[in-house]
Image: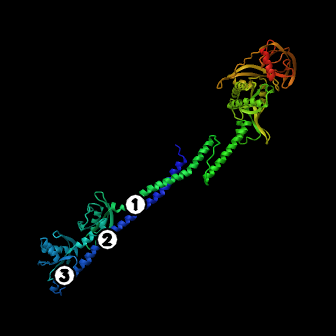
Amino acid sequence: MRFNIFWKLLLFSIPLAILPLASLGLYSLKNSENELKSTINDELMQTARSVGERIDNLVLDQWRAPLELMAGTLANPDLPASAKLALLTSVSALPDIVALQVSSDEGGEPALIVQDRIAELIQAGGGRAAERLLVPHSRLRVASEAAIVNGHITRIEEPTLELLHLVLPVAGDVGNASTLLSARIDLARLRQHVENHPFNENGAILLLDQRGEPLFGAASDILDDNPLTRQLAELRQGAGASVGVMPFRTETGRAILGGYALPRSLPWTVVVERDAATAYLPVERMRQRLLMWALIAALLATLAAWLFSRRISRPIIALDRAVKRVGEGDLETQAPVLDRRDEIGYLAIQINVMIRGLRDREHIKDVFGRYQNVEVMRTLLETPGALALGGERREITAMMSDLRGFTALTENYSPEQVVTMLNRYFEPMVEIIQKHRGTIDDILGDGMFIMFGAPLRMNDHAARAVACAIEMQLAMEEINRANRRDGLPPLEMGIGLNSGEVIIGNIGSEKRAKFSAIGSPVNMAARVEGYTVGGQLLVSDSVRQPLEGILELGKCMQVKAKGLKTPMSITEVIGIAGDYNLRLPVRQECLSVLAQPLPIGYVAISGKEDTGQAGEGLLVASDGRSAEIEITNTLDTLTDIRLNLFAGGLDHDDLYAKVTDKTERGMRIRFTRLSEKARRFLESAGND
């Protein structure tokens, strides 16, 4: 399947226009996605770090520092007991610390100081502060082995309280016993900080204790078994960085962007998370917008490519059509004149110049072809060195044709009528000759010299020449029918054929030359034609012998042609079989016996000279073209004679005839030159 240039340009231009836009869009999208991921990761780590730092600030600066100061004060032996008690009762002044407990391993009753607000809340909930908040010394001792804190949280449901338990050893003795200071810290402020953090608008913050259990924060499914959970377990054991991010998928398949931080002050873990779909929603929206704009850009690019391809291809297609019409022989076509100053416009101009050149060349060929054979013309135009003088030996068949008695026949007609008869005769003759690939070497008046086998080589030149000659004779019937319709006389043609080796080539000078054939076979063809009468085809043995099996032959005659030392055989051809299957009609000569024979005088001639044989006789029968004469001398068959008819006022008219046969009473002749006046007289004499 052939694609024209429009589709080729379009299919090439569309990717060329779209690919850069698509590449730029994809690059922008990828770059934006990477920047967004980086921003989100920074946000996750920053949020986790800020929450962890908030925890460290609360524990170390606001909770631990006053407790350490208080423990140191309790350990001072110089400080009175009343002062120490007063210090413990100042718990209400400490932020978030709602209860203090001092216990000793001596087994005495621990001292518990509770903020009034907390005591009232517990009592309002139906409980007692001592029962809810007091911790046995043995448990505190275990906790104190963690140096400062263990992060344990006590939850009180009525009222709702989340209390962090911090235990510090008191340096020195209080009453010569090991003493521990423990504090209960209200985590409401930390919870409020976590839950009201701006990050919760788009994500979630969760605090996990040392066992990985949730302390407080947004409900989440990140506690499922997933890569982040496993990594947090390792981090709590002391391996890995204190801040990081890790995207993962939950058991339900939801994509999560996770971040974490490990506070320094507590064995807790701060976990932050964002839903990946929500986090990357700007990228998805950007992708959708990009897809929309990509479609619009693709449509615009396709339209631009279509317009570009159309602008480029339309003139090229128009030029292609014009050139195709020229290739098909239509030289009247014209390439479209393009209003553009580029290579395509210049190409259109040059194509029109080429068409004009071809038109002029064809005109020259047409004119040249009227005066020279088409095959010869092609050979001269297409063959390098064809114009050089000289030639080559070639086996050809030469044909000579001539209209019998045409000069005398046309004496009483105007030049225009003569030209009409000749053109009417030559028109079909030339077509028949070209049909059989003959080469018209020359047209001499009413005669022609035709070659078969030059300049085009052909092995069957003799058969082509015979078939052409028969078809030419058959065409004479239509020519004469048209002549009679226009009041013009009928014409008769004689044709002679001879084959042989000749020299073909350019004969003449550098300034004027002619492509022709030179050699005795050409002259011999003229001799053979000279023995013909109207409607007859004679061939030499050089033509007859190669075609013996397909020719239908008539009489065979021995003649002594001019220039030959020995007689030659010429044979009348009636038809040819094989691929041609052509045959001449049988000539019926119906001579009318004259009621009164006409006296004649005759002279035998050879060429244009008298042979000396002369005499008188009688013309006893005639049909206007042939006649029977009675003479005292005997003439050879095919002898040319000049007659004078002493009757009808024709005493001074020279009539020419050829002896065609011998009869019982004399000779049968065929007129070869007969004036119109003489023809009419003989026809009327034969009808009387």
Residue 674 can be seen in this image: no
Q: Are marks 1 and 2 in contact (CB under 8 Å)?
A: no
Classify 632 as above or below 301: above
Which numbered disc flags the more N-terminal residue, 3 or 1? 3
Picture disc at residue 90: 3
Check the image and name the residue furthest to the right: 612
Determine which quarter of the picture holds residue 83.
bottom left
Which numbered disc flags the more N-terminal residue, 1 or 2? 2
Q: x, y percentage for residue 205?
A: 28, 67
Q: Secondary structure at mark 2?
A: helix
Left or right, 244 with respect to 156, comes to right
Distance (Cα) linking label 3 and label 1: 59 Å
Amino acid type, label 2: Arg
User: Could you say which is closer to the camera, residue 53 or residue 566?
Assistant: 53
Residue 456 can be seen in this image: yes
Which of discs 3 and 2 lies nearer the camera? The answer is 3
Classify 99 as above or below 471: below
Classify 447 as above or below 120: above
Residue under label 2, please give it: 49
Q: x, y percentage for residue 564?
A: 81, 25
Amino acid type, label 3: Ser
Residue under label 1, please give it: 286
User: Could you say which is closer to the camera, residue 148 or residue 197?
Assistant: 197
User: Could you say which is closer to the camera, residue 481 or residue 466?
Assistant: 481
Q: x, y percentage for residue 187?
A: 22, 72
Q: Secondary structure at mark 1?
A: helix
Picture disc at residue 465: none
Distance (Cα) linking label 3 and label 2: 33 Å
Determine which quarter of the picture holds residue 167.
bottom left
